[in-house]
């Protein structure tokens, strides 16, 4: 496994703009200072997150709490 | 309002409307799944390849759910639906009937076509037709990721070179015209009767307007104009489609609404989709 890299500033890439303001808790250090890297991960059920505290990538089951609906059309939000 | 535990509890007109609507959604998802799968390779980023592959799995999974419902409620076998229907009987959004040759075309389909199918699904959330109400929430939950992906890539490409923006605008115009053909007019007997029975939880006009509002917002914030305009603080189609000959059973206006689009699924796509090259190895086929 590669050593952890230095923390990076939040990406300005608009691919990630819709995924801002994560409230997902890191499973390794329990920090909520995390952000979503991708809606799609190693399997269909997982999104990929990055912990800005312990600098670790982790996966998150999509239908657990924490994935926000902001910037999505009203017809998919309850 | 009365609910319908199964298709046999529906009056005949509603039974046929539900069957047609579910089949049209399933067919379009089948083709979306095919195109996403093709873009597992050749996309501009590894992340996009993973996303395309995942979205394909989602769509094929949704097709299986819808086919199971069509089979149990309407006696339409999944095998027959995929293997033995003539190409002209697939009720797809026409922009999917030929290969999506560029990433701009794929992003346009991801945003515009996938979004339209999802707005139709949202109309079935809490439906009085119980067999579909059961799985709609889960399906829409998965579609959220598709729409995030479509929006993200659309905005990314919209911020690129003039050539990229132009390709995206052309692809989006074509996808939107085909999508509006599939959606059909605001006022239509089929949707009105489904809404009156609580099978659709919104009027078709309200669903279409939610879709137009969303597409209009993405278009405006991205600076790419493609067929939706804002007037008196509301979005609407820039040019109305001539729905005079629109038929709810095939969701077509009679002739293609955009240049270069076929009303019929390309036979090469069906050949690959059906796995015809390996027909001798198919499960359940006579040796």
Image (tube, coloured by chain):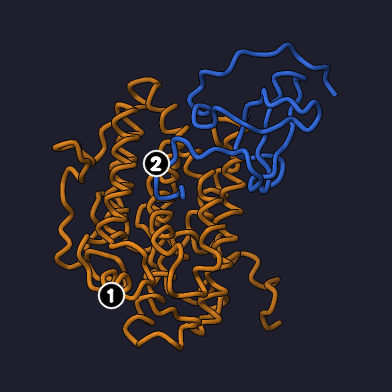
Chain colours: A blue, B orange
Residue B222 x/y as whole percent: 34, 28
The answer to whether B219 appears left or right of B58 in the picture is left
Of callouts 1 and 2, which one flags the residue occurring earlier in the amino acid sequence? 2
- Residue placed furthest toward the front: B1
Taking B197 as reference, is B213 above or below it? above
Q: Residue at x 56, y 27 (%)?
A: A21
- Residue placed furthest toward the right: A1
Secondary structure, mark 1, is helix
Q: Residue at x 50, y 40 (%)?
A: A69
Task: Please rate how many residues cluster around mark 1, counting C-alpha atoms within 10 Å: few if below 14, some from 14 to 19, many from 20.
Answer: some
Residue B234 x/y as whole percent: 20, 40
Mark linked to residue B92: none
Taking B259 as reference, is B245 above or below it? below
| Disc 1 versus disc 2: nearer the observer | 1
How much space separates mark 1 and mark 2, taking CA atoms? 31 Å
Q: Chain of mark 2?
A: B
Residue A54 x/y as whole percent: 77, 20
Q: Residue at x 41, y 76 (%)?
A: B19
Secondary structure, mark 2, is helix
Residue B185 x/y as whole percent: 22, 61
Taking B124 as reference, is B286 above or below it? below
Q: Residue at x 20, y 64 (%)?
A: B187
The answer to whether B61 appears left or right of B119 in the picture is right
Mark linked to residue B193: 1
- As rendered, which of A53 and B189 lies closer to the eye? A53
Asked if disc 1 and disc 2 are in contact, CB closer than 8 Å, the reply is: no
- As rendered, which of B32 and A12 lies closer to the eye? A12
According to the picture, the residue beneath numbered tag 2 turns out to be B108
Quadrant of the rendered image containing residue B134: bottom right
Task: Please rate how many residues cluster around mark 2, counting C-alpha atoms within 10 Å: few if below 14, some from 14 to 19, many from 20.
Answer: many
């Amino acid at each position: 496994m590669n050593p952890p890299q230095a923390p990076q500033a939040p990406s300005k890439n608009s691919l990630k703009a819709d995924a801002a303001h994560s409230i997902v808790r890191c499973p390794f250090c329990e920090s909520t200072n995390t952000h979503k890297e991708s809606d799609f991960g190693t399997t269909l059920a997982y999104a990929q997150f990055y912990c800005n505290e312990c600098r670790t990538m982790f996966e998150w089951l999509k239908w657990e709490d924490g994935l926000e609906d902001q910037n999505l059309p009203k017809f998919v939000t309850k | 309002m009365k609910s319908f535990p199964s298709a046999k509890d529906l009056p005949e007109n509603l039974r046929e409307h539900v069957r047609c609507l579910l089949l049209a959604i399933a067919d379009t998802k089948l083709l979306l799944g095919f195109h996403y799968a093709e873009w597992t390779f050749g996309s501009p980023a590894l992340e996009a390849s993973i996303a395309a592959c995942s979205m394909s799995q989602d769509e094929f999974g949704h097709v299986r759910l819808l086919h199971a419902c069509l089979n149990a409620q309407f006696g339409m076998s999944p095998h027959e639906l995929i293997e033995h229907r003539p190409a002209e009987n697939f009720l797809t959004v026409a922009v999917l009937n030929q290969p999506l040759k560029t990433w701009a075309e794929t992003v346009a389909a991801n945003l515009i076509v996938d979004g339209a199918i999802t707005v139709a699904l949202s109309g079935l959330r809490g439906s009085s037709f119980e067999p579909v109400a059961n799985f709609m929430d889960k399906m829409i939950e998965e579609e959220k990721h598709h729409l995030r992906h479509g929006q993200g890539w659309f905005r990314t490409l919209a911020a690129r070179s003039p050539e990229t923006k132009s390709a995206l605008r052309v692809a989006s115009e074509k996808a939107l015209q085909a999508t509006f053909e599939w959606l059909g007019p605001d006022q239509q007997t089929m949707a009105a009767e489904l809404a009156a029975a609580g099978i659709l939880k919104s009027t078709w006009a309200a669903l279409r307007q939610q879709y137009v509002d969303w597409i209009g917002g993405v278009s405006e914030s991205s600076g790419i104009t493609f067929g939706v305009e804002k007037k008196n603080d509301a979005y609407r189609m820039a040019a109305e489609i001539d729905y005079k000959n629109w038929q709810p059973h095939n969701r077509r206006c009679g002739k293609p609404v955009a240049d270069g689009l076929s009303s019929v699924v390309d036979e090469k796509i069906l050949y690959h989709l059906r796995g015809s090259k390996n027909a001798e190895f198919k499960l359940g086929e006579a040796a």
